[in-house]
Image (tube, rainbow, N blue to C red):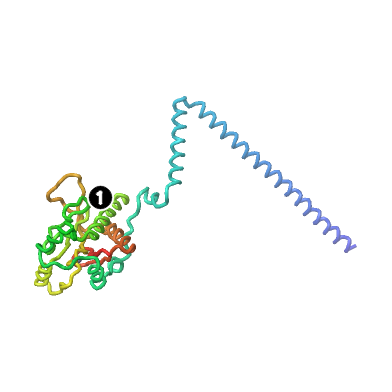
């Protein structure tokens, strides 16, 4: 008796669970059907609403809307086709600079003098001797250039060997180009020191005992370019233009230009902390 009763109870539970499972299963299937039905219904409603809106629009408004859509699509496509570099910062290249001025431009006198002796002239004693070399086309006057400005020179004269002049032009053109590409106002670089005669060097040594006798500046291969002042390009002649001083983005752009050329093996560069310039020699 006991055994039979227990068995029927167990059987009842099993049947109950099976019925419940079937019920849940059927409910789930129904649920999916209901969901699909609502989704389809929603789509239909949306379609109806769009049609209604389009019917409400006047022909001109419809045309305008189509034009707007086409324009947006064109913009999306152009933006996608553009190289990544051009897209960053709203279509403008970023100013990156170098990670360290003194570490990236370490070329000391001992390194630069080798290139100076190799590419340069035999040092001249005075201006008259320099003029002779200009007539022989060994030196060129760099005073008048649309690419840079020459500072008032106190211990040097504006002559370089053609190779160094070419390097200077490249630096200054690349700098102006970079300014434009990076969305900065275009400025000219300022040359602060060029060729020194042996007389200039002895005059310098009188004032500064640390000035070296065998300066790279004596070979016409070396220039100093200021990083603490820049000449704005206004498009009009001004006898005393207000210079842009101590501008970090400009200094960074100049350092990028010099770093590129140095890495290409076109020049040696030394970051002069005290003089506020880059001292560089063509290679
Ligand atoms: Zn120098």
The quadrant in which residue 117 appears is bottom left
Q: Position of residue 221 (x, y in %)?
A: 22, 64
Is the CB atom of the residue marked by disc 1 within 8 angstroms of ligand 1's nearest atom?
no
For image coordinates 30% across by 53% down, the residue present is 178
The quadrant in which residue 201 appears is bottom left
**Secondary structure found at label 1:** loop
For image coordinates 19% across by 57% down, the residue present is 190
Q: Is residue 182 left or right of residue 73?
A: left
When the figure is inspected, residue 169 is found, relative to residue 237, above or below; the finding is below
When the figure is inspected, residue 161 is found, relative to residue 30, above or below; the finding is below
Q: Is residue 218 left or right of residue 52?
A: left
Q: Position of residue 167 (x, y in %)?
A: 26, 58
Q: Residue furthest right?
A: 1
Q: Is residue 159 left or right of residue 171?
A: left
Q: Position of residue 94 (x, y in %)?
A: 34, 54
Q: Position of residue 47 (x, y in %)?
A: 57, 33
Q: Residue furthest front?
A: 136
Please name the residue that numbered disc 1 is placed on.
Answer: 186
For image coordinates 25% across by 71% down, the residue present is 114
Q: Quadrant of the C terminus?
A: bottom left
């Amino acid at each position: 008796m006991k055994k039979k009763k227990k068995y029927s109870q167990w059987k009842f539970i099993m049947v109950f669970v099976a019925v419940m499972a079937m019920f849940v299963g059927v409910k789930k299937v129904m649920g999916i059907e209901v969901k699909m039905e609502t989704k389809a219904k929603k789509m239909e409603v949306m379609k109806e609403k769009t049609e209604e809106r389009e019917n409400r629009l006047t022909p001109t408004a419809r045309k305008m809307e189509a034009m707007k859509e086409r324009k947006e699509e064109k913009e999306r496509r152009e933006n996608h086709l553009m190289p990544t570099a051009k897209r960053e910062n709203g279509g403008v290249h970023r100013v990156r600079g170098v990670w360290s001025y003194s570490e990236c431009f370490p070329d000391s006198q001992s390194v630069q003098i080798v290139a100076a002796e190799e590419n340069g002239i035999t040092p001249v004693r005075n201006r008259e001797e320099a003029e002779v070399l200009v007539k022989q086309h060994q030196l060129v006057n760099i005073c008048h250039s649309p690419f840079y400005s020459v500072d008032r020179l106190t211990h040097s004269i504006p002559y370089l060997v053609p190779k160094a002049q070419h390097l200077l032009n490249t630096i200054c053109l690349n700098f102006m180009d970079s300014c434009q590409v990076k969305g900065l106002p275009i400025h000219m670089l300022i040359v602060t020191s060029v060729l020194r005669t042996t007389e200039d060097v002895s005059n310098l040594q009188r004032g500064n005992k640390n000035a070296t006798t065998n300066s790279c500046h004596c070979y016409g291969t070396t220039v100093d370019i200021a990083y603490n002042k820049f000449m704005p390009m206004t498009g009009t002649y001004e006898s005393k233009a207000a210079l842009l001083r101590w501008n970090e983005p400009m200094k960074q752009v100049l350092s990028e230009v010099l770093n590129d050329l140095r890495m290409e093996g076109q020049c040696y560069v030394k970051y002069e902390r005290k003089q506020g310039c880059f001292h560089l020699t063509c290679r």
